[in-house]
Amino acid sequence: MNELSQKKAPIYEALNEYKSLRIVSFDVPGHKQGHGNPELTEFLGKKCMSVDVNSMKPLDNLCHPVSVIKEAEELAADAFGAAHAFFIVGGTTASVQAMVMSVCKKGDKIIMPRNVHRSAINALIVCGAVPVYVNPGVNKELGIPLGMSVSDVEKAILENPDAKAVLTNNPTYYGVCSDLKAITQLAHKHGMYSLVDEAHGTHFYFGENMPISAMAAGADMAAVSMHKTGGSLTQSSFLLIGKSMSVGHVRQIINLTQTTSGSYLLMSSLDISRRNLALDGIEIFKRVTRFSEYAREEINKIGGYYAFSKEIIDGDTVFDFDVTKLSIHTRDIGLAGIEVYDILRDEYGIQIEFGDVGNVLAIISVGDRELAIERLIGALAEIKRLYSKDKTGMLDHEYIDPDVVLAPQEAFYADNTSVPIDESENLVCGEFVMCYPPGIPILAPGERITREILDYISYAKEKGLLLTGTEDMSVERINIVEA
């Protein structure tokens, strides 16, 4: 890494130069550097509004970068060890979809774990590719889906030699990592691309003693959610590619769906955050790791909770573990993760990332402070003392193996009928049902609705999980594929 070059932030510098020129604006956006919307300017600040601008010669164009955005992309690629990096302003959802659509077209097969984010299945609905699902491992004690076994991936490859790619989640929401290098080598050996949803893995590129990053593992493409753990603004992301990919082709795919009015607020946040991590990432993530390890140790001393870490590594479906993820099992105190999540927010003013039926996740990242960590630990201790109860009758698992009947695109665009969800057993689902976060579908288009799934949905509703994905906002009805 060339430290001198990494000190540059071309988009940020160009925006500062633009501000100094006091340009009179007769272009969009219509608020004209904040003058046309004083309430918004007061809320966000004059500095912010003055650089919410449109593409122009001095600031380059995201769809076809030739100057400052191009230079910023090259610096990002250097920082991440990629052949090229694309600035994405549609979230890592857009990065994941661009990955899939860059290597798959209608009818092509793609091997992926079923516990993917909805964005990956959305990409299949748009482009018509067909999933070959690999069921992840499951930790029965924690009730969570794990990574993919290399032997299961190999089996899927041998049974589907015409598949175009293997997509891996690395890490999962809970911090679980698959053997990414072995999976990538296996894919390449059989002439397939290796794609990685690395939404929660920005720090793998900059911290010490982290699980292997997608680019280091030799993957062809990786979607990196810079805003999650890297400090940039919400909705900003990088799409990284290796030498096997055509920069021009991937950019064309991105431009099919990405806005032609790229936000300079988002792009400059990526530019500045990349510079910060390239220069100081080792120290930043050393501190993040220290906070996470301390919190994990103190929470485990409370008793009843289980903040899990590297001890769950088994060399297979848990090949490695991201210690910055503060994943905490709550079921032994008689509370679902979502119940702990709600109590933390409503009674203690603490917002964590998510709660599911048996676990909570607290994201520890570049912006955390010691006092906040202590406050979380203290609140969890009080919750156990005040709210714990008998765990009898609690649901003990997160992941249910799907019964795939139709390809997602076929089911989504088929003639659908809306029926009460409690009357849908054994029918084929025509839409999504998921808890958000984390946004991993319980049901995806084309999957059979089983009694186990309906019981899970009912339990999730009872515990207060936010269910999304259906046309019916109350999730009382569900679209099913007409026979």
Image (cartoon, rainbow, N blue to C red):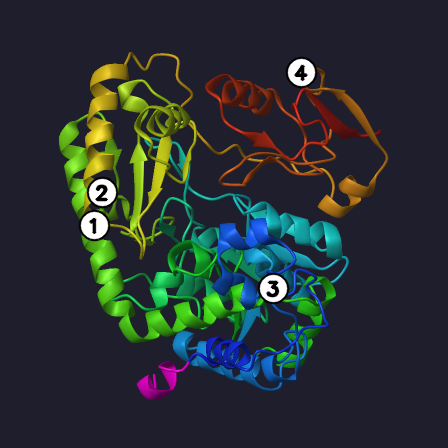
In the image, 324: left or right of 147?
left
Residue ID for mark 2: 373
The percent position of residue 231, horizontal first and vertical second, equals 39, 60
The question of residue 6 being in magenta is answered with yes
The percent position of residue 205, horizontal first and vertical second, equals 36, 68
Q: Amino acid at mark 1?
A: Phe
Tag in front: 4 or 2: 2
Distance from disc 4 to disc 2, alpha carbons, whole Å, reads 42 Å
Badge 2 density bin: few <14, some 14–19, many ≥20, Cα 10 Å? some
Q: Which quadrant does the N terminus fall into?
A: bottom left
Question: In this view of the protein, which residue sits in the foreground, 273 or 213?
Answer: 273
> Please, what secondary structure does the residue beneath circle 4 have?
helix
Q: Earlier in the sequence, mark 2 or mark 3?
A: 3
Q: Which residues are magenta?
A: 1-8
The question of residue 334 being in magenta is answered with no
Residue ID for mark 3: 99
Badge 4 density bin: few <14, some 14–19, many ≥20, Cα 10 Å? some
Tag in front: 4 or 1: 1
Q: Amino acid at mark 3?
A: Met
Q: Are marks 2 and 1 in contact (CB under 8 Å)?
A: yes
The percent position of residue 394, horizontal first and vertical second, equals 39, 17
Q: Earlier in the sequence, mark 2 or mark 1?
A: 1
> Please, what secondary structure does the residue beneath circle 3 have?
helix
Residue ID for mark 1: 291
> Please, what secondary structure does the residue beneath circle 2 have?
helix
Residue ID for mark 4: 422
Q: Which quadrant does the C terminus fall into?
A: top right
